[in-house]
Image (spheres, grey):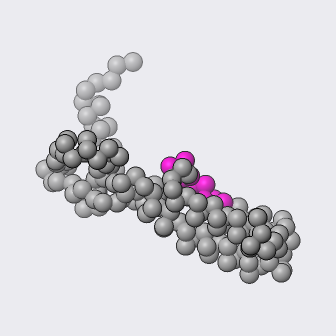
């Protein structure tokens, strides 16, 4: 099946019109871990759209995840922790009034869904232990286990 050049060009323009707005667009330049290579090969990239430059940002929000240019995932984990802590608070508030089945529903609705979203990106980062520690707190709260026990 052959696609005409005019048809492709029209679809491309429609796609860009929907996705790209220079007033809200930002560009994220991801740095390499090798600092020596980064310092030697620093090239300035100027991206424009409709003759307007797109500014380089230190962090951008992409599909609900905060991404920064250092790839250390401190920003998305820092944004996610208050959400997870509030889920832990809700579970602790219902501790004396609910069954294990209700705790499971609350856990999966508030905590698990927020934790799993994006875990493939930040799951191996150094700061991911903060999220997994919060998960342990919730499990301990559900089963009434002392926070100091292992």
Image coords of residue 58 (percent x, y): 30, 60
Between 22 and 110, the one nearer to me in the picture = 110
Q: Residue at x 37, y 57 (%)?
A: 68
Q: Give the magenta range.
A: 111-121
In the image, is residue 142 above or below residue 30? Answer: below
Left or right of 94, for residue 117: left
Image coords of residue 122 (percent x, y): 51, 53
Left or right of 15, for residue 114: right
Left or right of 62, for residue 45: left
Q: Residue at x 16, y 47 (%)?
A: 44
**Quadrant in which the N terminus is drawn:** top left
Magenta: main secondary structure: helix
User: Based on the displayed image, in which of its 4 quarters is residue 91 positioned?
Assistant: bottom right
Between 134 and 9, the one nearer to me in the picture = 134
Q: Is residue 114 magenta?
A: yes
Q: Residue at x 24, y 56 (%)?
A: 56
Q: Residue at x 74, y 73 (%)?
A: 147
Furthest residue to the top?
1
Q: Is residue 10 magenta?
A: no
Image coords of residue 41 (percent x, y): 20, 41
Furthest residue to the right?
99
In the image, is residue 127 above or below residue 45? Answer: below
Furthest residue to the left?
51
In the image, is residue 97 above or below residue 111? Answer: below
User: Based on the displayed image, in which of its 4 quarters is residue 74 positioned?
Assistant: bottom left
Image coords of residue 124 (percent x, y): 54, 49
User: Based on the displayed image, in which of its 4 quarters is residue 110 positioned?
Assistant: bottom right
For residue 21, say whether it is visible. no
Between 26 and 81, the one nearer to me in the picture = 81
């Amino acid at each position: 099946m052959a696609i005409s050049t005019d048809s492709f060009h029209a679809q491309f323009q429609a796609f860009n019109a929907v996705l790209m707005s220079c007033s809200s667009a930002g560009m994220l330049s991801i740095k390499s871990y090798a600092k020596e290579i980064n310092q030697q090969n620093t090239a300035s990239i100027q991206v424009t759209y409709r003759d307007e430059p797109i500014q380089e940002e230190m962090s951008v929000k992409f599909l609900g995840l905060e991404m920064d240019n250092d790839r250390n995932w401190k920003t998305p984990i820092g944004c996610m922790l208050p959400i997870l802590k509030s889920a832990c608070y809700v579970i602790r508030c219902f501790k004396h009034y609910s069954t294990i089945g209700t705790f499971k529903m609350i856990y999966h609705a508030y905590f698990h869904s927020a934790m799993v979203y994006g875990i493939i990106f930040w799951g191996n980062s150094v700061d991911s232990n903060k999220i997994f520690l919060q998960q342990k707190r919730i499990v301990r709260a559900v089963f009434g286990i002392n926070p100091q026990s292992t």
